[in-house]
Amino acid sequence: MTRKAPRQDVDENRVETSTPKDWAAGITGVTVSLARGLEQMGVGRTVRTLRLLNQREGFDCPGCAWPEPREADGERRKLAEFCENGAKAVAEEATRRLVDAAFFARHPVAELAERTDYWLGQQGRLTEPMVLREGATHYEPISWDEAFALTASTLRGLDDPNEAIFYTSGRTSNEAAFLYQLLVRSFGTNNLPDCSNMCHESSGAALSATTGIGKGSVSLADIHQADLIVVVGQNPGTNHPRMLSALEEAKAAGARIVAVNPLPEAGLMRFKNPQNVRGVVGKGTQLADEFAQIKLGGDLAFFQAIGHLLLAWERAAPGTVLDRSFVEGSTYGFEEYVERVGELDWDEVDEATGLDRDQIVRIARMLADSKRTIYCWAMGLTQHKHAVATITEIVNVALLRGMIGKPGAGLCPVRGHSNVQGDRTMGVWEKMPESFLGALEREFGVPIPRAHGWDTVDAIRAMRDGRGKVFFAVGGNFAAATPDSELTERALRSCELTVHVSTKLNRSHVVPGRTALILPTLGRTERDAQPGGEQFVTVEDSMSAVHTSRGRLRPASDKLLSEVAIICRTARTLFGADHPVPWQAFEGDYDLIRERIGRVVPGCADYNARVREPDGFVLPHAPRDSREFTGTRTGKAQFTVNELEFPRVGAGRLLLQTLRSHDQYNTTIYGLSDRYRGVEDGRRVVFMHPDDLAKLGFADGELVDLVSEWTDRERRAPRFRVIAYPCARGCAAAYFPEANALVALDSVAKTSNTPVSKSIVVRLEPTS
Ligand SMILES: Nc1nc2c(c(=O)[nH]1)N[C@H]1C(S)=C(S)[C@@H](COP(=O)(O)OP(=O)(O)OC[C@H]3O[C@@H](n4cnc5c(=O)[nH]c(N)nc54)[C@H](O)[C@@H]3O)O[C@H]1N2
Ligand SMILES: Nc1nc2c(c(=O)[nH]1)N[C@H]1C(S)=C(S)[C@@H](COP(=O)(O)OP(=O)(O)OC[C@H]3O[C@@H](n4cnc5c(=O)[nH]c(N)nc54)[C@H](O)[C@@H]3O)O[C@H]1N2
Ligand SMILES: [Mo]
């Protein structure tokens, strides 16, 4: 069996750079996915695993939330329905490297805290429950029963249930998520922060207010039928590689693509599909017909300018641009919108976007000519101060032309974690509506608190101020994913108890509370055997399709419990055996959980039967299904009026975005190769335009400290290597999570409270 020991730690002095690529995937993608599989899993397991990935009888890819083709929509799955980065995600989980009790005995926590995220993740899968007792230097084994007892007694000892915080990351199954929020609410709090608070919260806020539902309105079939697809603030070549196949298919049917991004991301420019001959040997498909290299945070101005042009053209030739009957019959607030963008300060648009006016006009013309437009976006829009307003400006433009609720058109926030959307549907949210909370209370006969809980940023504030005392996480890596790393780590360390239900070792385990537990759990790929037989779980993709996921591999260790089992046993220990919720029965047979989901969660009636249909089922979505906007304040689709807003930067400063390399999954670092951007063997790098380098007096290859400037104080991230790169001018980029130290906790998006990690004002200082 080929299984290599993990590589040694990162050394930024080794960084090698080459010219960035203008194409994504191709045969290198296939080679890399196989190599990573073999390195972590060996031959047999690699073949078995990849054969089951995203197939009906197999498991849902633990990578991104991009949907699989559905037969009901006339689509077919491919034999290999996965991508290079999905294969890496699976290799990370199904790895044969193990972190056992002996590992923790060898490494004091203080030593582990000095390691990088890459090193920690590469050590392998967690194998048994571990505890760090107060004052101890090492984690030591603990029995499951003792771990549950310790958690329960600490929770019971709190003065108020609201002193506990229950985090979720978006890999948790629907079944586990439903039970988790039930546990938390039965305990008496709505403190349910999740990764979505840092991710698509802004999309949810913008879409709920304007369309009445916080989810996207398109299906994969719509993407294939669109004649124009606008991809804004998203890097699909790395983060949603299977989306490139969909874009390629749309192109083959005649669609045009507009990419709006400060970086010329390889996947947006050209795609070599490794699944067909042309992609392996040829030049591939050119994707973007227009690439608008916008400045960070310039999108609100960009879409206002487009709205302005569309309205001007309509005035010049009435009836040729707007979808009048839609605007009149189905929307609200049109007049105010016209008043707002009818007048436009083009100088501001120039300054905000850095784009040629001619290009904005060309793109507006494409939108005016299109019959079926889809707008896709991700973190490039959601993680700005004015994120919610920016997304509502996209909605405005879509509404003008009636681009919602018809085939081939719509709004498509492309979700991150594979089940982040499902977790929300199941109630993981600090402010679920009364309709849901009431239904939960009636179903289970336990009192459900109504006061809103803390989201991610508020949870950090609460721990910092001593109001949050127990931190419990199902999945994720809170310490590394959140802003203001130093402050957040101090906040976590001040907790009485931290509990992490995890598959792999990460930074959150090594910045422990006074007492800390690591509870190792099954991953998506693994068999889940319970008294009621082998279980499957369900998940929801980015396009609201709910389907099953069945783990098939042998678990990494026989001491692992499923997430459902961990939640049920925690609840039984906490609430006692005579609690009205049948926790033990739920653990034995997940059908019983699904029965309750069917009765509580809107759109999930008859859940058990419908998830068993070949491709599962699609949740209802009024705007998509019937062009109804019953969820908004006015019952109509809502135009929004926003001030033209964009980040302004003083002299000698840059705007910095934090983003993902091609070789990571959020805080899980797969490797050190950002192939498309031409970076090898290092991650502490900062990309900037050669002109900015010259202007600021730095040279390519130099080592600098990044210093962010926020009202309260400065923050420093030392030792980044400068890379001259074709960024938009004034706009730099560095990787998440290394640059999280620069994001001030109070720098958040309006309304959504999402940390602003895509426009941080920084200056560079030579590393001393
Ligand atoms: N392989 C892999 N897949 C993943 C993930 C991963 O880490 N690795 N993460 C998953 C998760 S949780 C998520 S949320 C998604 C994230 O998917 P993405 O949103 O694609 O992730 P980022 O790397 O943050 O990339 C942001 C993109 O937006 C651009 N951008 C930044 N600021 C602006 C702006 O102001 N305007 C415009 N127009 N563009 C801007 C950046 O240049 C970059 O191309 O991917 C998911 N899939
Ligand atoms: N600066 C900056 N910060 C960001 C972002 C950014 O773009 N810039 N992006 C934000 C976004 S979009 C997101 S979604 C968040 C991500 O925040 P999180 O979701 O908290 O972080 P991840 O890195 O995805 O979590 C990885 C860990 O999850 C655990 N894990 C993996 N699979 C499973 C499983 O099946 N079950 C359980 N129980 N555990 C599992 C493993 O232990 C692994 O170490 O980060 C946010 N932070
Ligand atoms: Mo995300």
Image: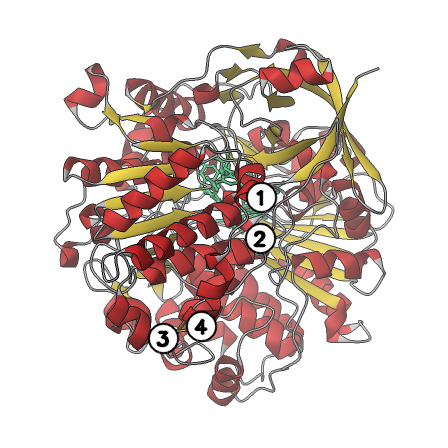
The part of the image, by quadrant, that contains residue 614 is bottom left
Q: Are marks 3 and 1 in contact (CB under 8 Å)?
A: no
Which of marks 1 and 3 precedes in the sequence? 1
110 left or right, relative to 282: right
Distance from mark 2 CB to nearest ligand 1 atom below 8 Å: no
User: What amino acid type is highlighted by mark number 1?
Assistant: Glu
Q: Vertical placement of 476 versus 102: above or below? A: below
Task: Kindly identify which residue carries mark 3.
Answer: 629
Distance from mark 4 CB to nearest ligand 1 atom below 8 Å: no
Mark 2: few, some, or many residues within 10 Å (few <14, many ≥20)? many
CA gap, disc 2 to disc 1?
8 Å
The part of the image, by quadrant, that contains residue 653 is top right
Give x and y (percent) for residue 409. Answer: 26, 56
Task: Kindly identify which residue carries mark 4.
Answer: 333
Residue 478 visible in the snapshot: yes
Give x and y (percent) for residue 631. Answer: 42, 77
Element marked by disc 4: loop
User: What amino acid type is highlighted by mark number 3?
Assistant: Phe
The quadrant of the rendering that contains the N terminus is top left
Give x and y (percent) for residue 601. Answer: 41, 76
Which of marks 4 and 1 precedes in the sequence? 4
Element marked by disc 1: helix
Task: Kindly identify which residue carries mark 2.
Answer: 644
Task: Kindly identify which residue carries mark 1.
Answer: 348
Q: Vertical placement of 600 versus 380: above or below? A: below
CA gap, disc 2 to disc 4?
18 Å
